Amino acid sequence: MKSKTKTTIKYIGAKLSKLQSSLNKHSDAALWLLGFALLATGLCADSFAQLATAPGSGVAGGDDRIYEVVNRIFLLIEGNLGALIMISAGLGAIIAAAFGAYRAAVGLLVVAVGAFILRSLVAIFFDWQ
């Protein structure tokens, strides 16, 4: 009985070591596959959250909700948050130019001006009222 148990343990150990060596050879593919499987199983419950069994029983969405959210974002950016973004990006552009990082200075200058004229840009390009 003991010899049969020992052979079974050796057999399982040999199979596990073979599995480990093949996983070491293909570790990137195995990790990608494991990550994809974890994401697929973890997110499938969330994807069923909006399914409705009867017409009209799902979450009501539409243009009104999107309009309210975008309007809130615009109000934030045009208010104190926009002023903070403009001032910090402007100071960052001045400091970056002083250190010789002209690419960063131009990028920060674009951010500062973009925060100032965001609603105008959206109205021009997306016909926003």
Image (cartoon, rainbow, N blue to C red):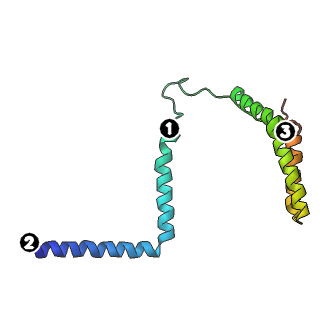
| Residue under the point 82% across and 45% down | 85
Of helix, strand and loop, which one carries label 2? loop
Q: From the viewer's perspective, tell me whether residue 16 is left or right of residue 9.
A: right
**Circle 1: residue type:** Phe
Residue holding disc 1: 48
Circle 3 residues within 10 Å: few <14, some 14–19, many ≥20: few
Q: Which image quadrant for residue 124?
A: top right
Measuring 46% from the left and 49% from the top, which residue is drawn there? Answer: 41
Q: Which residue is mark 2?
A: 1
Q: Which mark is residue 16?
A: none
Which amino acid type is shown beneath numbered disc 2? Answer: Met
Which residue is identified by label 3? 122
Residue 18, above or below 78: below
Q: Return the disc, 2 or 3, that comes first in the chain's sequence.
A: 2
Seen in the picture, residue 96 relative to 78 is either above or below; the reply is below
Of residue 56 and residue 47, the one placed in the foreground of this image is: 47
Q: Position of residue 24 (x, y in %)?
A: 44, 74
The residue located at (13%, 73%) in the rendering is: 4
